[in-house]
Amino acid sequence: MASLIADHPPQTLAYELTGLLDVDWPTVWAGTPADDTERGRWCEGFGWEPLWFASGLWVRTRRNGRLHLTSASPGRPVTAVSYTAWRARADQAAENPALMAAAVDRYAAHLAAVTEVLGPPDWHGAWDAPDFPAPHTPADRGDADRRLEHRTPHRFARWSFRTPAAPVFELSADLAPGTAPGWGPGSATISLTCHGPADPQGRTGPGWLL
């Protein structure tokens, strides 16, 4: 039987997203302070509680959710803010098809919730759509051949806005490599990611994207 690692209702995702709409994004993209005390004050300004740093700062929101602020290191620009809504792991490869079906079902519910907040996406569809949008960079999710082989992102939606410094919002149902081909027990994750500008120093760590 597949194991649930995270299972937040779509309403919770919509609630967290509503809180992100009022965020001062230029301050977020500028990066978290390297000094612990200053970083605590910086988080307090957003109503966040700093937790730990792992490929970026993890914070707890005033709505009791958990966000990951991607950056190469403290003091470097934040390039994305993400929230994991659902994650499950199969115990054996034979469970992968059921796991994938569950991911599609949960993704549909979360897509409806995000659409209630942001409106219709600019694009949404499945991994095999002929007009599947290009990733932000070649290293982001890999190339088309990898997407077709591993069927990931399995489902995907994107929203973009003209407001200066506003993030590009993406909702995705991602499969771990080998899940679709059945190479072993797989896993699936549904997450909402708010993408920002690139780290001007380049990808010298995980702090990169657009």
Image (cartoon, grey):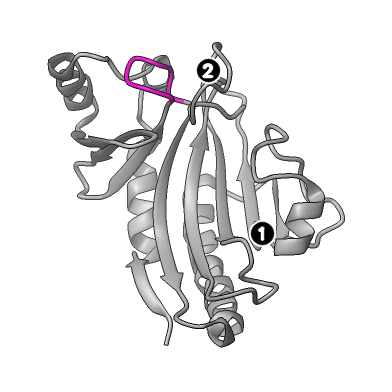
Nearest the viewer among 93 and 7 is 93
Quarter placement of the N terminus = bottom left
Q: Does 79 sit left or right of 45 as displayed?
A: right
51 up-or-down from 156: above or below: above
Residue underneath mark 2: 199
Name the residue rendered at 49%, 61% in the picture.
189
Q: Quadrant of residue 161?
A: top right
Q: Point out residue 143 in the picture as x, y percentages from the top left corner.
A: 77, 45
Say whether residue 78 is left or right of residue 67. right
Q: Earlier in the sequence, mark 2 or mark 1?
A: 1
Q: Kindly give the residue lying farthest to the right in the view shown.
A: 130
Query: Which residue is under mark 1?
Result: 152
Q: Residue 3, image x and y in percent?
A: 38, 77
Magenta part mainly helix, strand or loop? loop
Magenta-tinted stretch = 72-78
Q: Residue at the location (35% across, 31% down)? A: 22
Callout count: 2
